[in-house]
Image (tube, rainbow, N blue to C red):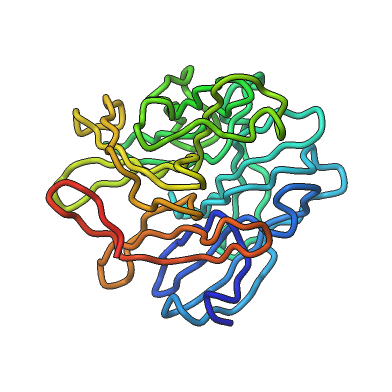
Amino acid sequence: MKTNEINIRDPYILAHNGMYYLYGTRSETCWGKAEGFDCYKSKDMEHWTGPVEIFRRPETFFATENFWAPECYYYGGSFYLLTTFGGPGIKKGIYILKSDQPEGPFVLYGERLNPADWNCIDGTLYFEKEQVYLIYSHSFEDTPDADICMAELEKDLSKAMAEPRVLFSAKEALWAKPVPFAKEEFGMEGDIYFSDGPCVFRMENEKLYLTWSSWSRGSYAVGAAVSESGTVEGPWMQMEKPIWPENGGHGMVFQDHGGKKYFALHYPNDKTKERPCFKRLLLEGDELRLT
């Protein structure tokens, strides 16, 4: 099948051994009861085989909903699938699944990676100087300013080493706007922001960037921040305008087999119509641009 025939949200690409592996949130089960995750495989990022089911929740599995945003990492000889899980009576949280193969099967590994009393979504990993950092969104149900948080993980990825810290809040970005349907859909009063889909990466100017998604002027959008210290600790300076302004989001950065950087996101953001979308990621001065 071709890329525009794949119906997923939150696309993630792992380039490994001459192949591209595509993971994502199943569109049809995104907002209700969920069963698992899939993988697609390609040599050219255009023609794909699959889906292959890489994880299916056991009957006694603790989570039944919010099977969101799988990201696959090859690390220490194994494949780790970083995911969000939740369900009735369970606060959404970040977990890891592990496998010997990029196409699974994956099994639950280690501990919940964020505090048990927090609602957290969309974890991503960043590796720097032999340290592993987990970056994720502390969701609006707990913090209406929608924080992006960070915690250092154990080297084996089994658990967090320390308490998380806030890197920044969605409210700090000029392009991010309060969700206009917060009261109608979530029963929340006041200005409610949200953040999701963080991704941390370094560009050829050696600067460290963090892309993330939020509500903007009328729809879902992607913005970016740059670390003033050059490290994941920040402080993070928000770019004034979004890099993807409308009806698409939850992006991530990967390099193709030729070394070119791409940005993967889902577009449009309309329910059951989401498709993975790949754009070249370029610099104009120190500003990020998508082709």
What residue sits 42% from the left and 26% below the top? Answer: 171
Side of 211 where 95 appears, left or right: right
Residue 123, horizontal then vertical, whole percent: 51, 39
> Along the line of sight, which residue is nearer the eye, 222 or 209?
222
**Quarter occupied by residue 56:** bottom right
What residue sits 57% from the left and 26% below the top? Answer: 114
Quadrant of the snapshot with the N terminus: bottom right
Residue 106, horizontal then vertical, whole percent: 65, 54
Question: Does residue 270 lie above or below 196 as drawn?
Answer: below
**Quarter occupied by residue 234:** top left
Total count of labels: 0
Quadrant of the snapshot with the C terminus: bottom left
Side of 89 where 146 appears, left or right: left
**Quarter occupied by residue 53:** bottom right
> Along the line of sight, which residue is nearer the eye, 267 or 5?
267
> Along the line of sight, which residue is nearer the eye, 92 or 100?
92
Side of 144 where 116 appears, left or right: right
Residue 28, horizontal then vertical, whole percent: 73, 59
Q: Residue furthest right?
A: 59
Side of 140 where 20 appears, left or right: left
What residue sits 40% from the left and 71% below the top? Answer: 17
What residue sits 37% from the left and 55% below the top? Answer: 253
Residue 230, horizontal then vertical, whole percent: 20, 34
